[in-house]
Image (spheres, helix red, strand yellow):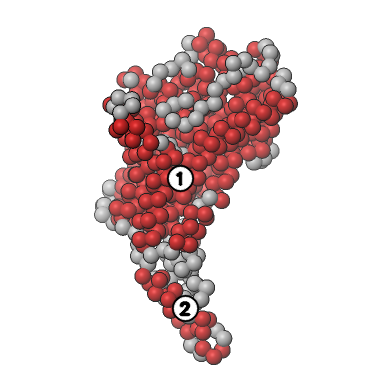
Amino acid sequence: MVTVLAAPAAPLTDAGNTQLIIAALLGIAAVVLLIAWGKVHPFLSLILGAAVLGVVAGVSPDKIVTSFSGGVGSTVGGVGLLIALGAMIGGLLAESGGADGIVERVVSRVSGTALPWAMAGVAALIGLPLFFEVGVVLLVPIVLLVSRRTDVPLMKIGIPALAGLSVLHGLVPPHPGPLVAIDALGANLGQTLALGLLVAIPTVIVAGPVFGNFIARYVPATAPEALLPTRRPLTPAGRPGPAATGRGPVDADGDLVAEDDLVNPGTGRPGELIDEAATERVRARRAPALWAAVVTVLLPVVLMLLRAIGELTLDEGTGGRKALDIVGTPIVALLAGVIFAMIFLGYRTGFSRSQVSGFLGGSLPPIAGIILIVAAGGGFKQVLVDAGVGNLVADAAKDANLSPLLLGWLVAVGIRVATGSATVATITAAGIVAPLAATLQGPEVALLALAIGCGSLFFSHVNDAGFWLVKEYFGLTVGQTIKSWSVMETIISVVGFVGVLLLDLIL
């Protein structure tokens, strides 16, 4: 289980309830205004918001710093490592062509009417280890190409693919949002993963193929010519070479050499620099096997699920239970996925050790900002908890007889609409309702994490980077993007939350 930040024995301030409420509202408002109006980076916004919260609540500056730093450290230790390992898996899938192989194999074997369902399934599979933005970059060019080749309306294929990515991003670990909610609430990761997958399946169906078939009538989008994918073979150094249909000779630096440059070796042109050994390495490189890409995606998930099953079926202290507890630990499970990908998507396909190392290292800089936002969110949350705001909210919810699941969903919805960030919404909502988790049992805590995740996906609009990413990739107007993408996100949020409530009744 991910480490959990416990509330202190006594709040860091003796402020009254009214002052704490004002502090919480002003702290959250500061974050919202800085992000939405001031265009300040969420990392800085969360730091400044925590300072506002602490000062208004009457917490001394040194204790604000200590509380915030403690939250940052605990969150990075519990979540940051998982995000980094997940990014490495995604990087190897992308660079090796394994992700493309999964997509192309599926879409080549289904008819036009089944393509939306196939794309939803592929996106969900690809979306397990990848961040939403990475999944979009990988999948959308393929979606555009498939739409052009099959003459199927773009929205019929695009919306299911986006739904598969978005649902997994919001509900299923090891994505940052679910991990942060699990960390803050003390939920069981295996239970959250299993229940999240149960909620995700019907949610993807409704928000994906069903809604995509409907909205395609009203958003007649076509694939932008400039974004149609063109294969660019990698050089031995791991860099993209010129667009080409085959792998030609390369120079000593590992760059592909045009045929015209092979003449007149006495002029000093690149023809003199042909590296025959490097050329043979490029030609020998092969696409990874489909099974290797699929296993890379599913291995961490299966290991974590096995641990959850062992916790339910095996006695504590037995050898089998201990083994499953170790291999199903999130860090170990993701590390196993990374090592498997290094071997079967890297070395076995012809990449050198230095290239594989480069792919792994190259996957980390893009997620540095995500880790910082998550870490700052953990610090903000801890200031909320240490100031006593969380206990105040819990007492108010008990008095109002408001369901913890509904409260978590509503708080996340409000922050998501205001800031545009699903991660910020998850972090803040989880911090506010964290004390309520102590009143819940077993699966209910996991369901609370999922309710918050559902709320964090509600109605993406112009203050969300994902909104503009989808708009540009699909060549849509702002109005078309709201009709398609924004409504799809709202459907995901509502249908997913209904699924959470139904599971709550059953469990």
**Which quarter of the rendered picture does the C terminus lie within?**
top left
Q: Residue at x 46, y 68 (%)?
A: 236
The picture places residue 347, in percent across and down from the top left corner, at: 39, 60
* Amino acid type indicated by mark 2: Asp
Q: Can residue 93 be seen here? A: yes
Instruction: Name the one closer to the observer, 137 or 366.
Output: 366
Q: Can residue 453 be seen here? A: no
Q: Which mark is residue 477?
A: none
- Under circle 1, the secondary element is helix
**Which quarter of the rendered picture does the N terminus lie within?**
top left
Q: Which mark is residue 86?
A: 1
Q: Residue at x 43, y 23 (%)?
A: 445
Is disc 2 in contact with disc 1, using a CB cutoff of under 8 Å?
Answer: no
Residue 447: quarter of image: top left
Residue 371: quarter of image: top right
**Sequence-earlier tag: 2 or 1:** 1
The picture places residue 254, in percent across and down from the top left corner, at: 49, 72
Residue 93 relative to residue 17: left or right:
left
Instruction: Name the one closer to the observer, 27 or 162.
Output: 27
Image height of 451 relative to 261, above or below: above
Q: Within 10 angstroms of label 2, few (less than 14), some, or many (20 or more) residues?
A: some
Cα–Cα span, label 2 and label 1: 35 Å
Instruction: Name the one closer to the observer, 244 or 16.
Output: 16
Image height of 219 relative to 26, above or below: below
Q: Return the residue found at the far top.
A: 399
Please tell me how many numbered marks the rendered image carries: 2
Residue 60 relative to residue 410: left or right:
right
Q: Residue at x 51, y 88 (%)?
A: 265
The residue to which callout 2 is attached is 275
- Under circle 2, the secondary element is loop
Q: Within 10 angstroms of label 1, few (less than 14), some, or many (20 or more) residues?
A: many
